[in-house]
Image (cartoon, rainbow, N blue to C red):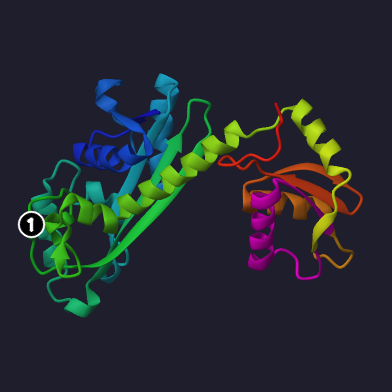
């Protein structure tokens, strides 16, 4: 799987490539595909700006694209610089100047009030235009001075466990960082998305499953308590053991049958193959040890 990183920031591209690699995802820098592209970040949130960048590259190339919008949010400055982090003190200003300016703003702020967080919102758009988002945060403090030379951006003044981000090795930073958390969450969502696509049922397969479901007994029911964690676990366990299960919705259920069925399907990564009367049928293929032969 290959994805275009919609950014000109080589530090971000290296982190994308490093964290995506274990998931079999190769990263192509934007400059290798679309030269001299600059996307104006006009959004009011990290999410909107990430989408603007990823969608622009996707629209131009027709290929999968991923973009990150991230920033440093300082509590003593009411969340600033936030989404304007890259443009703080001017977009073309060096980060040395940006950091010096921030440290001057915080000069009178005591250490216990210098709390801050890095936020990363990542937007992925596949070749078909399907959008998947993930966000990660990392809590820390703003140090009294810059330290380290391994990071980029505001890393030298952002401290976690008495070390600045610029003092951390790649593996340490990836474990803590906002972008590391967001990328791992995105990779997990991509894997689920791919599995879901592979497991989509044809009309013929659905018909076969409905036939197989007719004689099976109802093993779980939804009553006045509705859907809760305990029920989701029961459904997950049953699907793992049987692949195909039948459930019943009681009259005192807080929601109608179709809503219950769809919510449980989404919560367990399964499919609703039939709803009839007060009952519905869920199916989820056990990829490691299939039980029902559909082909």
| Number of callouts | 1
Q: In this view, does 4 lie above or below 233?
A: above
Classify residue 27 by image quadrant: top left
Question: In the structure shown, which secondary structural element does the residue marked by tag 1 occupy?
Answer: loop
Image height of 5 relative to 269, above or below: above
Q: Please say whether residue 240 is one of the residues in the magenta stretch.
A: yes
* Res 253 visible: yes
The N terminus lies in which quarter of the figure?
Answer: top left
Q: Is residue 220 above or below residue 16?
A: below
Q: Is residue 158 magenta?
A: no
Q: Position of residue 157 (x, y in %)?
A: 14, 61
Closer to the camera in the image, 268 or 124? 268
Is residue 76 left or right of 182 when viewed as pictured?
left
Relative vertical location of residue 252 with respect to residue 170 in this rendering, above or below: below
The quadrant of the picture occupied by the C terminus is: top right
Residue extent of the magenta highlight: 222-248
Q: Residue 219: x percent and y percent? A: 80, 58
Label 1: which residue? Answer: 148
In the visual, does 218 lie left or right of 78? right
User: Which residue is painted at 8% across and 65% down in the image?
Assistant: 145
Which residue occupies 8% across, 61% down?
A: 146
Determine whether, in the image, residue 130 is placed left or right of residue 151.
Answer: right
Q: Examine the rendering and report whether any part of residue 37 can be seen.
A: no
The residue lying toward the viewer, choosing from 71 and 247, is 247
Q: Which residue is drawn at 65% across and 33% down?
A: 200
| Residue depicted at x 33% and y 40% | 22
- Crowding near pointer 1: few (<14 within 10 Å), some, many (20+)? some
x then y, percent, for residue 12: 25, 41
Residue 221 in the figure: left or right of residue 263: right
């Amino acid at each position: 799987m290959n994805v275009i990183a919609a950014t000109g920031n080589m530090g971000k591209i290296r982190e994308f490539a490093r964290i995506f690699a274990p998931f079999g995802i190769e990263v192509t820098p934007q400059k290798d595909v679309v030269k001299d592209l600059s996307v104006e970040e006009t959004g009011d949130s990290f999410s909107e700006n990430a989408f603007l960048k990823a969608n622009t590259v996707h629209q131009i190339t027709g290929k999968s694209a991923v973009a990150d919008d991230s920033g440093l949010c300082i509590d003593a400055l009411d969340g600033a610089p936030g989404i304007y982090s890259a443009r703080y003190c001017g977009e073309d200003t060096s980060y040395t100047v940006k950091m010096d300016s921030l440290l001057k703003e915080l000069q009178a702020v005591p250490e216990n009030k210098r709390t801050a967080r890095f936020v990363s919102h990542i937007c992925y758009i596949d070749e078909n235009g399907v959008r998947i988002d993930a966000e990660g945060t990392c809590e820390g403090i703003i140090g009294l001075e810059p330290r380290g030379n391994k990071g980029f951006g505001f890393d030298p003044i952002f401290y976690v466990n008495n070390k600045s981000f610029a003092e951390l090795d790649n593996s340490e930073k990836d474990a803590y960082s906002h972008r590391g958390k967001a990328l791992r969450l995105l990779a997990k969502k991509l894997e689920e998305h791919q599995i879901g696509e592979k497991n989509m049922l044809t009309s013929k397969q659905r018909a076969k499953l409905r036939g197989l479901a007719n004689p099976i007994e109802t093993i779980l029911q939804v009553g006045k308590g509705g859907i809760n964690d305990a029920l989701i676990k029961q459904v997950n366990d049953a699907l793992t053991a049987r692949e195909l299960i039948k459930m019943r919705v009681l009259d005192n259920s807080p929601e109608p049958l179709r809503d219950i069925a769809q919510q449980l399907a989404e919560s367990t990564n399964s499919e609703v193959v039939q709803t009839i009367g007060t009952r519905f049928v869920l199916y989820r293929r056990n990829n490691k040890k299939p039980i029902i032969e559909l082909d």
